């Protein structure tokens, strides 16, 4: 297949691109390489992808309409679009809601309209477990998600709804993937696992929001990439949870494990839990098992070991990176 993948230099995007390339697909990657977190990490991920002959990269912002029009004229025909580009982060979206809407909602609309114009009929969209705020555990795809508590979640809800509209009118096969707290090697520096490892390793204060009892259904990035690729088979319009699918892990449990592995004590500074943060997340993944044949392969502690090892092996890169 010939696939346009947005957010190719991102955390999930780079793993997904490499999985597609290893399966023999052609991948056209775009990313605006913005400075939400250190571009050096994005370039590190991108350097691996550029070793593949079937990978082409364009430094384009999907929220720039004219640039996207020119890109589609250049790269079509396409078999599919996988939209992993996003402004992510619940708390940051409260500080700059405009850029979240512009990228996540308007940018998604740009893709859908250009897909319609160029006859591309297969779409995979990265969404978020943040939409489930206020609903009972474990989260199931058919639960109503009409009470987003952050601009980030609201922008992803808008992207989901617009994708349905284009599916309804133009027959675009669409898979919506609600990711659950993705972690792993070369992760995002604004995410808890990356920060906890770096703060403890560097001997810097560890900023903990809440008392640490809040829990997450952590999902290893390679499993997430596998689920994303599997979603290319979807017909119609379907929503899938892509999560660990087991009992969630508390933040304090993760911190204590990292302390043990690194042989260092965390210097914890506790802050109030932000209003936009969810206390617990847990995915029901039965639909992904049944419909996609997807099952996570890496348990949290194995994945955390791999992540810590990556941090220890890449100090030349990481020691230069500021933590957002």
Image (spheres, helix red, strand yellow):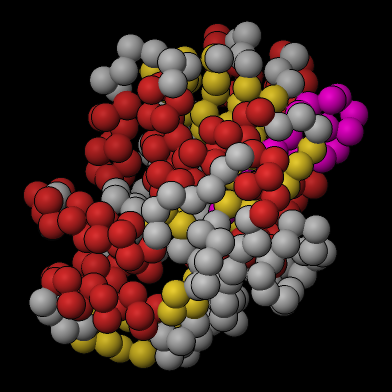
Task: Give the residues drawn in magenta, as a range.
Answer: 162-179
Residue 264 percent across, percent down from the top left = 12, 79
To which quarter of the image does residue 118 belong? top right
**Above or below for 220 versus 168:** below
- Which quadrant is the N terminus positioned in? top right
Residue at horizontal 24 percent and vertical 68 percent from the top: 197
From the viewer's perspective, tell me whether residue 101 is left or right of residue 265.
right
Residue 18 quadrant? top left
Is 174 one of the magenta-colored residues? Answer: yes
Tell me where residue 41 appears, x and y as whole percent: 27, 45
Is 95 covered by the magenta stretch? no
Q: Residue 184 or 300: which is nearer the viewer? A: 300
The residue at the point 56 percent across, 80 percent down is: 279
What residue is at 58 percent from the left and 71 percent from the top? 281
Q: Is residue 151 visible?
A: no
Closest to the observer: 54 or 207? Answer: 54
Is residue 114 in sight in this rendering?
yes
Is residue 150 toward the left or the right of residue 164 in the image?
left
- Which of the two residues, 212 or 257, is positioned nearer the viewer here? 257
Residue shown at 72% from the left, 76% from the top = 136
On screen, 213 above or below 26? below
320 w.r.t. 116: above or below: below
- Residue 266: give x, y in percent of width and height: 21, 83
Quadrant housing the C terminus: bottom left
Left-right relation of 210 to 134: left
Q: Residue furthest right?
A: 169
């Amino acid at each position: 297949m010939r696939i346009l993948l947005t957010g190719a230099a991102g955390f999930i995007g780079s793993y997904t691109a490499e999985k597609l390339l290893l399966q023999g697909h052609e991948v056209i990657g775009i990313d605006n390489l913005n400075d939400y977190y250190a571009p050096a990490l994005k370039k590190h991920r991108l350097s691996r992808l550029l070793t593949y002959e079937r990978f082409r990269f364009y430094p384009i912002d999907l929220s720039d309409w004219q640039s996207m029009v020119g890109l589609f004229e250049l790269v079509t025909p396409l078999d599919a679009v996988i939209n992993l580009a996003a402004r992510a982060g619940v708390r940051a979206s409260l500080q700059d809601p405009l850029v979240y809407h512009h990228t996540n909602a308007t940018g998604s609309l740009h893709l859908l309209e250009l897909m319609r114009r160029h006859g591309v009929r297969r779409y995979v969209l990265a969404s978020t477990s943040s939409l489930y705020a206020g609903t009972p555990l474990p989260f199931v795809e058919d639960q109503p998600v009409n009470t987003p508590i952050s601009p980030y979640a609201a922008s992803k809800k808008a992207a989901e709804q617009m994708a349905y509209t284009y599916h309804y009118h133009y027959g675009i096969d669409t898979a919506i993937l609600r990711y659950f707290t993705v972690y792993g090697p070369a992760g995002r520096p604004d995410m808890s696992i990356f920060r906890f490892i770096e703060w403890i390793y560097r001997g810097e204060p560890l900023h903990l929001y809440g008392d640490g009892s809040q829990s997450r259904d952590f999902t290893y990035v390679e499993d997430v990439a596998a689920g994303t690729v599997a979603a290319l088979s979807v017909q119609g319009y379907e929503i899938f949870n892509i999560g660990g699918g087991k009992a969630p892990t508390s933040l304090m449990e993760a911190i204590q494990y990292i302390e043990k592995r690194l042989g260092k004590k965390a210097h914890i500074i506790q802050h109030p839990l932000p209003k936009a943060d969810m206390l617990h997340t847990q995915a029901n993944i039965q639909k992904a098992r049944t419909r996609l044949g997807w099952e996570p392969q890496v348990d949290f502690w194995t994945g955390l070991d791999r992540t810590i090892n990556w941090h220890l092996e890449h100090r030349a890169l990481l020691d230069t990176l500021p933590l957002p």
